[in-house]
Image: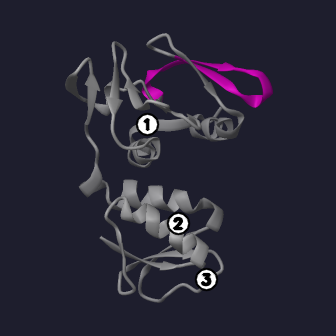
Amino acid sequence: MMVQLLCSNKVYEKLKQELSKYQIEIHPDSDWVLVEKGYDLPEGKLNIVFDAIDYMEVIKLVVSGIREDIYSMNTLTGLSENKFAVIEPADVVYLEAGPGGLMAYTKSNRYHIKETLQYYESLWTVKGFIRINKSQLVNLLHVKEIIPWFNSRFVLRMDNSMELEVSKMFSKKLRNTLKL
Protein backbone atom coordinates (compact mmCIF):
# COMPACT_ATOMS: atom_id res chain seq x y z
CA MET A 1 0.00 0.00 0.00
CA MET A 2 1.11 3.57 -0.64
CA VAL A 3 0.24 6.93 0.90
CA GLN A 4 1.25 10.49 0.13
CA LEU A 5 2.34 12.77 2.99
CA LEU A 6 1.74 16.53 3.18
CA CYS A 7 3.28 17.72 6.44
CA SER A 8 6.26 19.38 8.10
CA ASN A 9 9.67 17.73 7.76
CA LYS A 10 9.68 16.76 11.44
CA VAL A 11 6.30 14.98 11.21
CA TYR A 12 7.26 13.50 7.80
CA GLU A 13 10.28 11.72 9.33
CA LYS A 14 8.19 10.34 12.22
CA LEU A 15 5.41 9.14 9.89
CA LYS A 16 7.90 7.65 7.45
CA GLN A 17 9.52 5.63 10.24
CA GLU A 18 6.20 4.37 11.65
CA LEU A 19 4.66 3.56 8.25
CA SER A 20 7.72 1.55 7.23
CA LYS A 21 7.07 -0.83 10.15
CA TYR A 22 3.85 -1.86 8.39
CA GLN A 23 5.33 -1.94 4.86
CA ILE A 24 3.37 1.17 3.86
CA GLU A 25 5.27 3.14 1.22
CA ILE A 26 5.29 6.90 0.76
CA HIS A 27 4.57 7.87 -2.84
CA PRO A 28 3.44 11.21 -4.35
CA ASP A 29 1.00 9.51 -6.80
CA SER A 30 -1.00 7.68 -4.11
CA ASP A 31 -4.77 8.18 -3.90
CA TRP A 32 -4.49 8.31 -0.08
CA VAL A 33 -3.01 11.47 1.43
CA LEU A 34 -2.17 12.08 5.08
CA VAL A 35 -2.40 15.87 5.50
CA GLU A 36 -1.20 17.78 8.55
CA LYS A 37 -3.65 20.53 9.59
CA GLY A 38 -2.79 23.80 7.88
CA TYR A 39 -1.62 22.24 4.60
CA ASP A 40 -3.69 22.49 1.40
CA LEU A 41 -5.82 19.46 0.52
CA PRO A 42 -5.06 17.94 -2.88
CA GLU A 43 -8.05 17.61 -5.22
CA GLY A 44 -9.37 14.22 -6.30
CA LYS A 45 -7.70 12.20 -3.54
CA LEU A 46 -8.83 10.76 -0.23
CA ASN A 47 -7.41 13.14 2.38
CA ILE A 48 -6.97 12.22 6.03
CA VAL A 49 -6.31 15.40 8.02
CA PHE A 50 -4.52 15.14 11.36
CA ASP A 51 -3.00 17.35 14.05
CA ALA A 52 0.82 17.12 14.21
CA ILE A 53 0.66 16.15 17.88
CA ASP A 54 -1.66 13.23 17.01
CA TYR A 55 0.47 11.70 14.28
CA MET A 56 0.34 8.28 15.99
CA GLU A 57 -3.48 8.32 15.83
CA VAL A 58 -3.32 8.61 12.03
CA ILE A 59 -0.91 5.63 11.97
CA LYS A 60 -3.43 3.59 14.03
CA LEU A 61 -6.20 4.60 11.64
CA VAL A 62 -4.23 3.59 8.56
CA VAL A 63 -3.02 0.30 10.04
CA SER A 64 -6.21 -0.85 11.79
CA GLY A 65 -8.77 0.54 9.35
CA ILE A 66 -7.45 0.77 5.82
CA ARG A 67 -5.15 -2.23 6.11
CA GLU A 68 -7.30 -4.38 8.39
CA ASP A 69 -7.92 -6.87 5.61
CA ILE A 70 -4.18 -7.40 5.11
CA TYR A 71 -2.89 -6.94 8.65
CA SER A 72 -5.77 -8.28 10.67
CA MET A 73 -3.91 -10.01 13.44
CA ASN A 74 -6.09 -12.92 14.48
CA THR A 75 -3.57 -14.76 16.62
CA LEU A 76 -0.24 -14.30 18.31
CA THR A 77 2.47 -16.80 19.07
CA GLY A 78 3.88 -16.83 22.58
CA LEU A 79 6.66 -18.74 24.31
CA SER A 80 6.14 -20.28 27.74
CA GLU A 81 8.26 -22.99 29.41
CA ASN A 82 10.22 -23.60 26.18
CA LYS A 83 7.02 -24.26 24.22
CA PHE A 84 5.24 -22.08 21.71
CA ALA A 85 1.49 -21.56 21.85
CA VAL A 86 -0.90 -19.93 19.39
CA ILE A 87 -3.18 -17.55 21.30
CA GLU A 88 -6.40 -15.82 20.23
CA PRO A 89 -6.63 -12.09 21.08
CA ALA A 90 -9.87 -12.82 22.98
CA ASP A 91 -7.88 -15.06 25.38
CA VAL A 92 -5.35 -12.32 26.17
CA VAL A 93 -6.25 -10.52 29.41
CA TYR A 94 -3.49 -7.91 28.99
CA LEU A 95 -0.11 -7.25 27.41
CA GLU A 96 2.75 -5.78 29.41
CA ALA A 97 6.09 -4.35 28.32
CA GLY A 98 8.90 -4.88 30.80
CA PRO A 99 12.66 -5.25 31.03
CA GLY A 100 12.43 -8.84 29.73
CA GLY A 101 10.39 -7.85 26.68
CA LEU A 102 6.68 -8.04 25.93
CA MET A 103 4.47 -10.48 27.85
CA ALA A 104 0.94 -11.64 27.04
CA TYR A 105 -1.10 -12.68 30.08
CA THR A 106 -4.04 -15.09 29.77
CA LYS A 107 -6.21 -16.39 32.64
CA SER A 108 -3.91 -19.36 33.13
CA ASN A 109 -0.46 -18.47 31.82
CA ARG A 110 1.95 -15.81 30.60
CA TYR A 111 3.86 -15.83 27.33
CA HIS A 112 6.88 -14.02 25.93
CA ILE A 113 5.88 -12.48 22.60
CA LYS A 114 7.59 -10.52 19.84
CA GLU A 115 6.81 -7.05 18.50
CA THR A 116 6.11 -3.99 20.62
CA LEU A 117 3.21 -2.82 22.74
CA GLN A 118 2.63 -0.06 20.19
CA TYR A 119 2.39 -2.66 17.41
CA TYR A 120 -0.39 -4.57 19.18
CA GLU A 121 -2.10 -1.33 20.24
CA SER A 122 -2.34 -0.22 16.61
CA LEU A 123 -3.71 -3.59 15.47
CA TRP A 124 -5.91 -4.56 18.40
CA THR A 125 -7.68 -1.31 19.30
CA VAL A 126 -10.47 -2.50 16.97
CA LYS A 127 -10.59 -5.75 18.96
CA GLY A 128 -11.37 -3.99 22.28
CA PHE A 129 -7.87 -3.42 23.63
CA ILE A 130 -7.01 -0.09 25.27
CA ARG A 131 -3.76 1.38 26.57
CA ILE A 132 -4.01 2.06 30.33
CA ASN A 133 -0.47 3.24 31.07
CA LYS A 134 2.92 3.40 29.39
CA SER A 135 3.53 -0.34 29.71
CA GLN A 136 0.13 -2.10 29.62
CA LEU A 137 -2.55 -2.79 27.02
CA VAL A 138 -5.79 -4.30 28.38
CA ASN A 139 -8.53 -6.38 26.78
CA LEU A 140 -11.73 -4.65 27.94
CA LEU A 141 -13.64 -7.94 27.67
CA HIS A 142 -11.64 -9.23 30.67
CA VAL A 143 -12.29 -6.24 32.96
CA LYS A 144 -14.47 -7.37 35.88
CA GLU A 145 -14.56 -4.11 37.85
CA ILE A 146 -13.49 -0.50 37.38
CA ILE A 147 -12.58 1.08 40.71
CA PRO A 148 -12.24 4.89 40.95
CA TRP A 149 -8.86 5.74 42.46
CA PHE A 150 -6.94 8.81 43.65
CA ASN A 151 -6.16 11.78 41.36
CA SER A 152 -8.70 10.89 38.63
CA ARG A 153 -7.18 7.44 38.13
CA PHE A 154 -8.76 3.98 38.07
CA VAL A 155 -7.84 0.46 39.07
CA LEU A 156 -9.08 -2.33 36.79
CA ARG A 157 -9.82 -5.65 38.45
CA MET A 158 -9.39 -8.27 35.77
CA ASP A 159 -11.11 -11.65 35.55
CA ASN A 160 -7.77 -13.34 36.32
CA SER A 161 -7.80 -11.46 39.70
CA MET A 162 -5.03 -9.07 38.67
CA GLU A 163 -5.45 -5.40 39.53
CA LEU A 164 -4.01 -2.95 37.00
CA GLU A 165 -3.69 0.78 37.52
CA VAL A 166 -4.85 3.20 34.84
CA SER A 167 -2.51 6.18 34.85
CA LYS A 168 -3.91 9.70 35.02
CA MET A 169 -2.78 10.32 31.43
CA PHE A 170 -4.82 7.36 30.09
CA SER A 171 -7.84 7.75 32.43
CA LYS A 172 -9.55 10.29 30.17
CA LYS A 173 -9.35 7.94 27.17
CA LEU A 174 -10.79 5.09 29.27
CA ARG A 175 -13.60 7.34 30.50
CA ASN A 176 -14.43 8.40 26.94
CA THR A 177 -14.23 4.86 25.57
CA LEU A 178 -16.52 3.42 28.23
CA LYS A 179 -18.64 6.57 28.57
CA LEU A 180 -17.98 6.81 32.35
Which label's residue is closer to the chain start, 1 or 3? Answer: 3
Q: Residue farthest to the right?
A: 151
Residue type (three-letter) at the residue carrying disc 3: Tyr
The relative height of residue 73 versus residue 99 in the rendered view (above or below) is below
Local crowd size for mark 2, using a 10 Å CA cut-off: few (<14), some (14–19), many (≥20): few
Q: Is residue 56 magenta?
A: no
What quarter of the picture does the C terminus occupy?
top right
Give the x, y percent position of residue 77: 25, 33
Which stretch appears magenta? 140-157
The residue tagged 3 is 39
Between the residue at mark 1 and the residue at mark 2, the CA separation in whole angstroms equals: 26 Å
Which residue lies under the disc numbered 2?
A: 14
Work out whether mark 2 precedes mark 3 in sequence or the reverse, and give the earlier one.
2
* Residue drawn at 58 percent across, 78 percent down: 9
Indicate the colouring scheme.
one colour
Name the residue that disc number 1 marks: 128
- Under mark 1, the amino acid is Gly
Percent x, y of residue 28: 40, 86
Report the residue at 61% width, 36% height from top.
174
Find residue 48 and report its horizontal and vertical position in percent.
50, 71
Q: Nearer the viewer, mark 1 or mark 2?
A: 2
Give the mark nearer the N terminus: 1 vs 2: 2
Give the secondary structure at mark 3: loop
Q: Nearer the viewer, residue 143 or 2?
A: 2
Instruction: Report the residue at 45% width, 41% height from top.
Output: 117
Q: Residues within 10 Å of mark 3 (few under 14, many from 20)?
A: few
* Residue 141 magenta-highlighted: yes
